[in-house]
Amino acid sequence: MSLFRRSALIVVLALGSVGIAVPASAAATQLQAVSIARARTLPLGTVVTVKGTATTPAGWLESSSFDKGFGLQDLTAGIYVSVSVALPIAPRDQVRVTGTLQESYGLLILVPADPATQVAVHGKGLAVLPAWRATGRVDETSEGSLVRVVGRVTQAPESDLPYGYKFLVDDGSGELTVFVSTQPGIDLSGLAVGKIVSVAGFSGQFDTHYELIPRFQSDIAVLFG
């Protein structure tokens, strides 16, 4: 054993003998990453690390979530990352997050204790494309992921301020609530009952119902009517 390695070993043993521990935040960031699908099966209160692609701008849901969170998705599933500080995160950013699994009004969320050390961006990747779903199948199996539906507007946009606005769409498989937060500034004036629309966004949940949450004006398009 070299003198350097022997000295390092003595230092490590000495530190352990006096009970010096690695700070909790540093220890958490060393967790091995698991798939988001795996993370979604773990009990609330579990600390996990996941990696994926940001699917929303940070803070796009702030008027409703009261935080500055963002969507994160890998090849297996998606999840909402809840942070209390503004982070320069945008769609396509490759992000590694360590946090605690919690629930907010039925929505599974990942909450970093220290976003400055537990949320790290590692460049850009390919954009995540929304998966096509029937309106009646935007549910627990899609929660946290990007989804696109096409359906008829069955209830025109109405105010849910200060949280945002909402309207209903249905393709025949069941009505789906589309919730639009105030941050993106999406114009809903062109929507009316009977129009056929395409809507994309983050698949979320509030209490007992599931909802689709657009991110940009381009997420909503009138196809007919």
Image: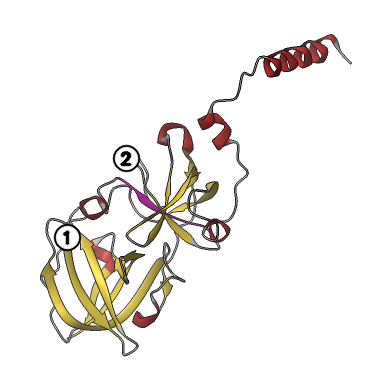
- Using the rendered view, name the quadrant where residue 12 is placed: top right
Q: In the image, is residue 9 above or below residue 135?
A: above
* Residue at 50% across, 63% down: 77
Magenta-colored stretch includes residue 6: no
* Residue at 41% across, 36% down: 115
* Residue at 29% across, 73% down: 199
* Badge 1 vs badge 2, beta-carbon distance below 8 Å: no
Magenta-colored stretch includes residue 72: yes
Q: Position of residue 197 (x, y in %)?
A: 25, 79
Q: Position of residue 112 (x, y in %)?
A: 43, 41
Q: Position of residue 103 (x, y in %)?
A: 39, 55
Tell whether 208 sits left or right of 31: left
* Residue at 84% across, 9% down: 3
Q: Which residue is mark 2?
A: 84
- Using the rendered view, name the quadrant where residue 18 is placed: top right
Q: Residues within 10 Å of mark 2 (few under 14, many from 20)?
A: some
Badge 2 marks a residue whose secondary structure is loop
**Residue 202 visible in the snapshot:** no
Q: Which residues are magenta?
A: 68-74
Mark 1–mark 2 distance (CA, rounded to whole Å): 20 Å
Q: In the image, is residue 26 above or below residue 188?
A: above
Tell me the kind of residue under disc 2.
Answer: Ser
Q: Which residue is mark 1?
A: 164
Q: In the image, is residue 50 above or below residue 210?
A: above
- Using the rendered view, name the quadrant where residue 7 is placed: top right
Front position in the image: 128 or 152? 152
Quadrant including the C terminus: bottom left
Q: Which comes before the other along the chain, label 1 or label 2?
A: 2
Q: Residue furthest front?
A: 18
Q: Which of the labelled discs sits on residue 183, or is there none? A: none
Badge 1 marks a residue whose secondary structure is strand
